[in-house]
Image (cartoon, helix red, strand yellow):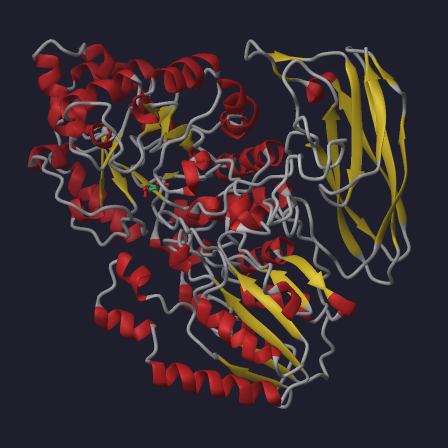
């Protein structure tokens, strides 16, 4: 409708109707089956508040959303359609690899297509908004939500943030999904990697490393932002005027809807920031949080705040306007269903084309971390024992695939059967994924349910024996192992990041058979593989690979696909290194340059400084040579640009895709800069023995950083450029910025 009419509508609403538009409740309040995540507890709001609530959390399905919409609109004095929002983070029904795997593709264009497909499935199912992408910078693998991030680098995360937002929103308003970027801001820096914990950093670090990916999402047009659970420098984000008003709204010109995270407004009391729900409501609304997700605050407290003269109703009007505008921009007043229907679901969901794309993404997400003596790809005539708890497991989707269809998952065994037959494929589960009953209990499983997933000691021993017997029949063992899906994702912080003990014990027994072992690692984060690495000949990090995971793994293992994935988050050597990331600072006593004695340098005395596997690292079945690094000039004027070039040669007899990475070091600056910062990359396909020249344009903007005044600046001086296969690259060229 015309905005003038929308303004009239707003002005005609009672305060109760206005407040209703600022509340989000989950499906059970609309007597719907829903997949509501987060703490379930009695909300304590009135029936009227439920009647007027303007948005629904995590209910999907054309039939269900239509039913709720119809019931809601019936008899309303002002029939303002509900808006359905959900966690559709890396797929709707067709599930892609977790975002940490998507980051490992280094292929934002491909991921944009995947997110457009996701939006198509979800809009057909009656959803209008997704709480995605999650663009938090993740540098601490103890944090379970590393799963949802594309990794540790601001530049790479920004590229993916933009592509995901564009993919979700490109078909708006008629189709597509509104992107609600989260969790603003700096949630990935929770202290000790512990979920919901405090974050604390200088404004300089915030602006330089933690804000860029959110900015990229807002610049790409994200229409919503979710405020995060954490405090930032002592102020909870959900009541943080500086972050939400001064930076997000004023500095970045964001005039869209801000929604709190789940119950986060009420949690301002638990933080010790508000003395009660009324004060929490005032603080959040004045920080311009528009929608209260699943807390009683706005529903119960906004009206008394106004009637008691503690809050100006105009602040409520501003929030309601942004919500009404969002609904109007989506055309919901004209079509509350926005074209969703069961017929459309059948037509658009989990189509062969969408599955094919999911397989391609899954294949590109996988990272070959080790391949001793070119053990991989496997010869199809070899006898293979596929052993381990993930060998035929359908749960390859990860914790946040809340609407995924696990029955549709292609398991690893399914994939292997496309290459091997009963003569040369022998399988055995060997052990459970996880046997730590307290972790299952913390997820709310009761004893009976736990007994269903944790075998008895007798069965465990029998499974072990069966695995050993099965392995004896084979030439090669493929060990499909990894962390349990409930060990990662939200509230999945871990202090110990190795494979589960029972899996390590089985691996020990298998390694005594003196047969080559290939490890397939299923995980939602970088695990500590330091003790496992010497026992296996090859390692593939598959993440939670999604609906087509089994097919993608088989295509890589049997050589149909040449792995091209590169890590977007470092794999630590030990948990004591965390947080760890490649773009470290030199310090005054770098082990690489210091002249002090060997002890008195910035290092550990008991473990190396370096991760087991670095950011940007990954192998393929080809050897690629980098040579002839050259610059178009050794001098760069502020107003000019220069070109850095390198030749890459495929030294193998098979096609390969190489992710050529360009890093820059600002050698001297008024605020010290990292020894390397990713500033560009290019995926290059190379035929056998083909050489290509890859060029990167260097300009002033690329060299900018946040100065002492926390404003972007560029300073003349010397810069090193590194171009190589990963962040360990040492060869560089130098230029001078005048
Ligand atoms: C959760 C998560 C957030 C999610 C929201 C709705 O607690 O922090 O990422 O979008 O609640 O489910």
Q: Residue at (52%, 46%) from the top-left corner? A: 576
Question: Could you tell me which quadrant the C terminus lies in?
Answer: top right
Please say if 384 is above or below 494. below
Establish if 544 lies above or below 136: below
The picture places residue 268, in percent across and down from the top left corner, at 24, 28
Question: At which x and y percent is residue 681?
Answer: 72, 37
Q: Is residue 685 left or right of residue 54?
A: right
| Left or right, residue 257 beside residue 10 | right
Q: Would you identify the image quadrant in which residue 339 lies?
A: top left
Rendered location of residue 96, percent (x, y): 51, 54
- 537 or 619, which is in the foreground? 537
- Tell me the residue at 60%/46% (across/down): 570
Does residue 226 show up?
yes
In this view, the residue in front, 421 or 112, is 421
Task: Provide residue 232's location: percent of width, then percent of height.
Answer: 39, 25
Residue for point 33% across, 72% down: 453
Q: Nearer the viewer, residue 411 or 347?
A: 411
Choose top left, top right, bottom left or bottom right for residue 646.
Answer: top right
Question: How many tags in the picture?
Answer: 0
User: Does residue 14 show up?
Assistant: no
* Left or right position of 538 against 427: right
Quadrant into which the N terminus falls: top left
Residue 318: name its quadrant: top left
Rendered view: 118 above or below 412: above
Above or below, comparing residue 173 to residue 614 in the picture:
above
Q: Quadrant of ligand 1?
A: top left
Along the horizontal axis of the image, is 734 left or right of 544? right
């Amino acid at each position: 409708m015309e905005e003038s009419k929308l303004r009239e509508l707003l002005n005609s609403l009672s305060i109760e109707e206005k407040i209703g538009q600022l509340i989000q409740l989950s499906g059970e309040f609309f007597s719907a089956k829903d997949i509501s995540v987060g703490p379930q507890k009695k909300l304590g709001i009135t029936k009227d508040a439920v009647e007027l609530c303007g948005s629904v959390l995590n209910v999907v399905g054309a039939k269900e959303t239509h039913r709720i919409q119809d019931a809601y609109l019936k008899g309303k004095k002002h029939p303002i359609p509900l808006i359905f929002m959900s966690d559709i983070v890396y797929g709707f029904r067709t599930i892609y690899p977790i975002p940490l795997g998507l980051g490992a593709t280094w292929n934002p264009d491909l991921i944009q297509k995947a997110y457009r497909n996701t939006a198509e499935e979800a809009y057909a199912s009656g959803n209008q908004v997704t709480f995605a992408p999650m663009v938090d910078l993740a540098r601490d693998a103890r944090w379970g939500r590393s799963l949802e991030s594309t990794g540790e680098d601001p530049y790479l995360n920004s590229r993916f943030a933009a592509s995901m937002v564009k993919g979700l929103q490109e078909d708006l308003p008629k189709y597509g999904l509104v992107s609600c970027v989260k969790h603003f801001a700096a949630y990935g820096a929770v202290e000790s990697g512990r979920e919901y914990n405090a974050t604390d950093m200088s404004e300089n670090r915030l602006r330089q490393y933690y804000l860029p990916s959110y900015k990229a999402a807002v610049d790409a047009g994200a229409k919503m932002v979710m405020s995060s659970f954490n405090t930032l420098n002592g102020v909870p984000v959900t009541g943080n005027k500086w972050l939400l008003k001064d930076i997000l709204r004023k500095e970045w010109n964001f005039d869209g809807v801000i929604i709190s995270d789940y119950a986060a407004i009420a949690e301002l009391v638990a933080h010790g920031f508000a003395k009660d729900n009324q004060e929490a409501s005032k603080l959040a609304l004045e920080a311009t949080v528009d929608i209260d997700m699943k807390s009683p605050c706005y529903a119960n407290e906004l009206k008394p705040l106004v009637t008691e003269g503690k809050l100006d109703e105009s602040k409520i009007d501003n929030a309601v306007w942004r919500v009404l505008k969002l609904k109007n921009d989506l055309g919901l007043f004209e079509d509350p269903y926005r074209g969703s229907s069961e017929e459309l679901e059948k037509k658009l969901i989990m189509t062969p084309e969408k599955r094919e794309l999911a397989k391609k993404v899954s294949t590109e997400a996988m990272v070959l971390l080790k391949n001793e003596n070119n053990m991989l790809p496997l010869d199809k005539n070899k006898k293979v024992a596929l052993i381990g708890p993930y060998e035929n497991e359908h749960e390859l989707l990860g914790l946040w695939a809340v609407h995924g269809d696990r029955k549709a998952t292609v398991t690893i065994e399914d994939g292997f059967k496309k290459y091997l037959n009963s003569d040369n494929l022998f399988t055995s589960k060997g052990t459970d994924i996880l046997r730590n009953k307290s972790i299952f209990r913390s997820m709310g499983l009761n004893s009976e349910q736990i007994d269903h997933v944790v075998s008895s000691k007798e069965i465990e021993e029998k499974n072990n024996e069966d695995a050993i017997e099965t392995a004896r029949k084979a030439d090669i063992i493929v060990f499909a192992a990894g962390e349990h899906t409930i060990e990662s994702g939200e509230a999945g912080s871990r202090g110990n990041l190795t494979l589960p003990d029972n899996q390590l014990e089985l691996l020990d027994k298998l390694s005594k058979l003196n047969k080559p072992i290939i490890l397939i690692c299923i995980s939602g984060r970088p695990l500590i593989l330091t003790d496992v690495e010497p026992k296996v000949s090859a390692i593939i990090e598959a993440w939670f690979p999604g609906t087509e995971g089994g097919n993608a793994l088989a295509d890589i293992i049997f050589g149909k696909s040449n792995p091209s994935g590169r890590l977007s988050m470092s794999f630590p050597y030990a948990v004591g290194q965390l947080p760890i990331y490649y773009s470290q600072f030199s310090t005054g006593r770098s082990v690489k340059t210091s002249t002090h004695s060997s002890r008195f340098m910035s290092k550990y005395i008991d473990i190396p400084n370096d991760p087991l596997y670095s950011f940007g690292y990954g192998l393929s079945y080809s050897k690629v040579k980098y040579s002839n690094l050259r610059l178009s000039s050794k001098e760069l004027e502020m107003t000019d640009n220069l070109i850095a070039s390198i030749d890459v040669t495929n030294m193998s007899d098979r096609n390969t895709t190489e992710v050529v990475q360009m890093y820059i070091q600002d050698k001297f600056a008024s605020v010290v800069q990292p020894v390397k910062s990713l500033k560009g990359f290019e995926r290059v396909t190379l035929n056998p023995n083909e050489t290509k020249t890859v060029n990167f344009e260097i300009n002033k903007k690329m060299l900018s950083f946040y100065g002492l005044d926390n404003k972007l600046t560029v300073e003349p001086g010397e810069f090193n450029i590194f171009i190589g296969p990963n962040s360990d690259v040492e060869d560089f060229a130098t230029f001078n910025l005048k």
